[in-house]
Image (tube, helix red, strand yellow):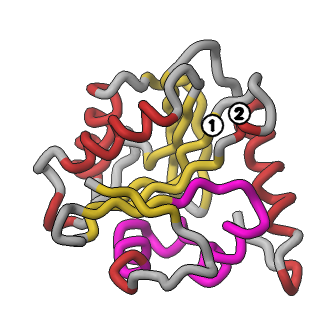
Amino acid sequence: MTEKHITPTDPIDPLLRRLYESAFPEEEQIPWDDLLVLTEKMPLDFTAYYDDSNRLLGLTIVYPRQSLNPMKANWFWYFAVPEELRGRGIGQSILKRLMEKYDGCTNILDMESPEQVCDNSLQRQRRHQFYLRNGFHDTGVGRSFGGIDYTIMMKGEGTFTMKDYDEIIAELRSFWERMPNGKEHS
C-alpha cells in the first residue's frame, strides 16, 4: 500500500473526489473545492491510499492538533474506503498505518451514533464495532447536527469532554471563516 499526501497544487485523482462525495452524507461534507482550499489554510493531513496497481483504497483527513500543541488531541476528521472494498481488511490496514503515524498521541473521531434510529443503523453499528476493535472507546460525549446524532470516540491517554469538543469546533470554524467569501460550514 502506498500513501499520497494530497495538496491542491497536485493533480487530483477524480476517484478520490468520488469516494469523498459518496462515502459521507452531503450534510457532513465540506464542498470538495472548499476542502482543497482548507488544505492550504490549515494544517490538514489529507492522504490517499493506493494498492500496487494504483487502485484507490481509501482516504483519510486528519487535523493534527498535537503538532500545534502537544496537550491537544488529533482529530480524525474523515476516513473512507470504497464501498466495494469494505470488509476486506483494507480499512484495518489504513487505520493501523494512521495509528503508527500518530503513535503516542491522543486521537479522537466523531461518527454517526450507533444508537440513533435511522436508515443506516446497521452500517453505524458495524463502524462503531470496527473502532472498538481497534482500540478506540466511547467518550460519553456526543452532539447533534442537522438531525444526526454523533458519538465521540477516543484512543489514547486522558479524557475528552464537551468543552474539548467545542474547542475543536471553534478551531475549525476559525479556519473556515478565513475562507474566500467568508463561507461558513458546520
* Residue range highlighted in magenta: 17-46
Residue 113 x, y percent position in the rendering:
43, 43
Specify whether 160 is left or right of 96: right
Do we see residue 168 in this rendering? yes
Q: Which residue does the image show at 27% across and 36% down from the upper left?
A: 130
Q: Say which element carries label 2.
A: helix
Q: Position of residue 65 (x, y in %)?
A: 71, 39
Near-viewer residue (89 or 137): 89
Residue 70 covered by magenta stretch: no
Quick check: is 28 in the magenta stretch?
yes
Judged by its main secondary structure, the magenta piece is helix
Residue at the (73%, 69%) spot, across then down: 40
Mark 2, residue position: 66
Identity of the residue drawn at 57% across and 49% down: 62
Q: Earlier in the sequence, mark 2 or mark 1?
A: 2
Which residue has dot 1 on it? 74
Q: Quadrant of residue 128?
A: top left
Amino acid at the residue labelled 2:
Gln
Can you say which quadrant of the picture contains the C terminus? bottom right
